[in-house]
Image (cartoon, rainbow, N blue to C red):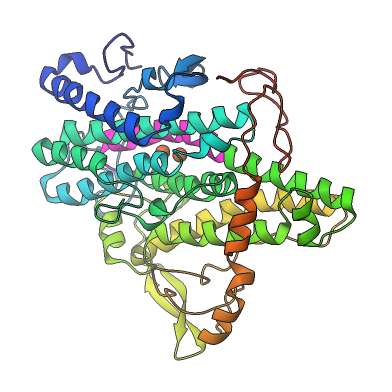
Amino acid sequence: MSSVNLSDRIPNNVNLSNDRTLQRALEHWQPRFLNWWDEMGPKEFAQNDVYLRTAVGVDAEGWASYGYVKMPDYRWGIFLADADPERKIGFGDFMGQPVWQQVPGEFRSQFRRLIVTQGDTEPASVEQQHLLGRVCPSLYDLRNLFQVNVEEGRHLWAMVYLLHAYFGRDGREEAEELLARHSGDVDKPRILGTFNEPIDDWLSFFCFTYFTDRDGKYQLKSLAESAFDPLARTCRFMLTEEAHHMFVGETGLGRVIRRTLEVMKETGSDDPAVIRQAGAMDLPLIQRYINFWFTSSLDLFGSEVSSNAASSFANGIKGRPDESLYSDHLALNDMFELAVPVGDDGQGTESIPMRNAMNEVARVAYVKDCGMGLKRWNMMIQRAGHEIELTLPSTRFNRGIGAWANVPTDPTGRRISAEAYAQSLSTWLPTEADRAHVRSLMQRVVEPGKIAGWLAPPDRGINNQPSAYEYVKL
Ligand SMILES: [Fe+2]
Ligand SMILES: [Fe+2]
C-alpha cells in the first residue's frame, strides 16, 4: 500500500517530497488555486465551519475523515488508488502488455487533451454552483453542496498533478489555463457546453448532480481503464468521491418528488397551478428539467461516430466503462447498429465499426444508469396512486452534438417538423415561467433541522449524524 503524507503542504500518497521540482511546481500552483477558490467559489461562506469529509488515504475501509473545516482550509490532496504491479493493458492494440508509467510520446497530445477536458469540468461546476448557498433549503443540503464543491476542487488537483508530473512545461501551462477559463465567460468559457450552463436554483443543482456528475462517472470509468497507469489510478480514486455527488442528485430529486406527491395529496389536485400555489414543484415541471439536463449531458459523450474514439480505444488511452465486463477487448470485428436521421423526416440504421462507436457505447451504458433513479421515483409516484410516469427522453431529442444535432424530434425521438417542434418546445423544456416559479421557491432556510417547503427532509443525516445536526455553523 502507498504511504500517505498528510503533514505535507499538499497531502498526498505519491511521495511528493521525493521529487522536489514537482513539489515546488505544485506548491507554486497552490496559492493560485486558493485565489481562484476565494474568487470563484462559495466565497460568502469562507469563514463558516462546515462538517466535511476529507480524503486522507485510499484505504477502502477508512479513506475519509469527517469534521468541521472552513472551506479555504480544506486539505486538498493528491491521492491515487494503490498500484497493482501486475496490471496489464486491458483492451485495444496493446492488450496484455504491461501498463505504462509514463506517457508514450506519440500519444502525448491525446492524453493531454483528455486530462485537460476532464480537469476543466471540475472547477467549472464549482463556478456554476457558487451562489446556491444563498438560497439553500436546509443546512443539510448546504453542507452537501459544499462537500461536492470541495471535492470538485480536489478533482482539479488530481488532474493538475498529472499535468505537472507527466507533461512538463505544456502541462504547467495547461494547469494555469484551468484557472483562467470560467463557466459562462463570453471570452474564455469552459470547454464543454453543459459546464457553461447556469445553475442558479436547487432543482438544477439536483439535476446536475444526478445527470452531469453521472456523465463524469462514465468518463472516469473509461479513463480508469487507461493504459497510462497514473491516470487510471487517479480516476479510480476519484470515482470513490463521485458516488456521493450522484447520491446528492438522486436523493435530492427524490425528496422534491416526494414533497410534490404530499402536496398533491393535501390539495387533492395534480393541476400544476394548484401545486405551484401550494409552494411545490409540479411533476410536469420536474420532467422538463430532467429533459433539459439529461439531453445536455448526453452531448458530453461526443459524436456517435468518432475516429478519435476509435484511436483512443486502439491505443489504450481510454477504454469502455467497465471494460472487464466485455468478453472481446479488441472490438475489431463487431459492428454497431446506429439509428440515424434519413432525408427530411425519416430514420434508418447505419452499421459502423465498433471501435468508431465507443462514444455511443459509453452513452448507452450511461442512459441505462440514469434510468435507475427514474424507476425508483416512478415507484413512489405509483404508490401514491398516480398514473403519471417520469421518463428519460430519447437520445435523439434536443441534441446539440452528433448525428441528431438540431434534428427536430419529440421526446420519444420521433421526427417532426421544425414548426411542430417550436410549437411544443414549451411543454418539453423548462420555460421562463417554470424557472421563475422555481426561483420564487428558493428561500434560505438555515435553522438546524428545518427544511424548505418544496422538498421533503432527508431520510438520514451524514456520517450517522442526526438530520437536524448543525452541518454548517453560520
Ligand atoms: Fe469531479
Ligand atoms: Fe462530481
> Of 157 and 162, which appears nearest the observer?
157
Q: Where in the figure is residue 279, as x and y percent of width and height?
A: 74, 48
| Residue at left offset 46%, top offset 50% | 215
**Would you place residue 351 above or below residue 306 in this image?**
below
Q: Tell me if 151 is positioned left or right of 468 in this view.
A: left
Query: Is residue 435 located in the magenta-colored stretch of the structure?
Result: no
Q: Quadrant of the C terminus?
A: top right
Q: Does residue 89 appear to the left or right of 437 in the view shown? A: left
Q: Is residue 31 above or below residue 246?
A: above
> On screen, 264 above or below 464?
below
Residues 196 and 362: in front is 196
Query: What is the span of residues highlighted in magenta in the rendered image?
Result: 226-246
Residue 388 seen by the camera: no
Give above or below for 111 relative to 2: below
Give residue 46's quadrant in the image: top left
Does the magenta portion include 234? yes
